[in-house]
Amino acid sequence: MNIPIAFISIRWLDIVDILFVAILLYQLYKLVKGTVAIRIFIGILSIYLFWKLVSAMQMELLSEILGQFIGVGVLALIIVFQQEIRRFLLLVGSQSSFAGPGFIKKILRWSNNSEETEQLNQTAILKACFNLSRTKTGALIIITTDTELKYHAATGEQLDAILSTGLLENIFFKNSPMHDGGVIIYENRIKAARCILPVSENPDIPSHFGLRHRAAIGITENSTAFAIIVSEETGKIAVAERGKLDDNLNTEQLRVRLENHFNLEE
């Protein structure tokens, strides 16, 4: 008795499909790596693969039960992975050629015939960070270009003042009523001070980093902002970008990071 053997036919579109799925899973893994959500992610993925296996084996009862669980589980995933989904969409949006302040400004200039927005006054920021570091004055500076972070700015004192070295130093002066919290800078203006920022829940952050560093990581995990931290204990300068923290920088290294992030011209 001859048993026909069916060979699997693979199209080039199937290879592209598998490649895209692999990239998507890898990006999701990077987002949840180091968080509690990684265990939930692995658990859901295991159940999904098991469901596909029993479906292929035509185990109808078990397949039906797991199918119902997966169907209801989609809503649970949206709730459980709320922050991770937000970070993923921000990552996709920030890396898209149609996203970012450059594209938005081009549209605004085309529609309004307005002049190009003045680039970031990095000199004022660098001088302030140098002086704050020298006097071991704690500071948290959030710089953003594509959004005003109005929700976070609303938690602090509204200023809308021109960015300057003296103003930054006065805000973070130890006896100033606004020295706690973060400063939000948008389009060369200090929009708000003493802002309450979300603290990162990443368990891999070293324990010697305080709330300023954790808040800087937290705000950059959920936005495309650039954060500068000056430690009150050591006076060391650190920067946070896309949820990653680099510490113990000097002012020259800070200048390079600012220029690279904001594409500043020398």
Image (cartoon, rainbow, N blue to C red):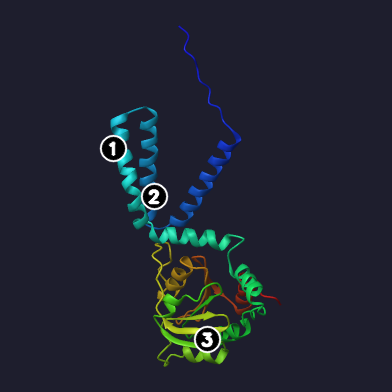
Q: Which SS class for mark 1?
A: helix
Q: Which of marks 3 and 1 is nearer the N terminus?
A: 1
Rendered position, 225 above or below 34:
below
Q: Distance between the residues labelled 2 and 3?
A: 42 Å
Identity of the residue drawn at 40% across and 71% down: 198
Rendered position, 173 above or below 69:
below
Q: Determine if residue 170 is in view.
A: yes
Identity of the residue drawn at 39% across and 80% down: 155
- Amino acid at the residue labelled 1: Ile
Q: Do the residues labelled 1 and 2 touch (CB within 8 Å)?
A: no
Residue 41: image tag: 2
Q: Are marks 3 and 1 in contact (CB under 8 Å)?
A: no
Name the image quarter holding the N terminus.
top left
Task: Provide the residue designation for mark 1.
Answer: 65
Q: Who is closer to the viewer here, 203 or 107?
A: 107
Q: Distance between the residues labelled 1 and 2?
A: 20 Å
Q: Which SS class for mark 3?
A: helix
Residue 213 placement (x, y as % from top left): 45, 73
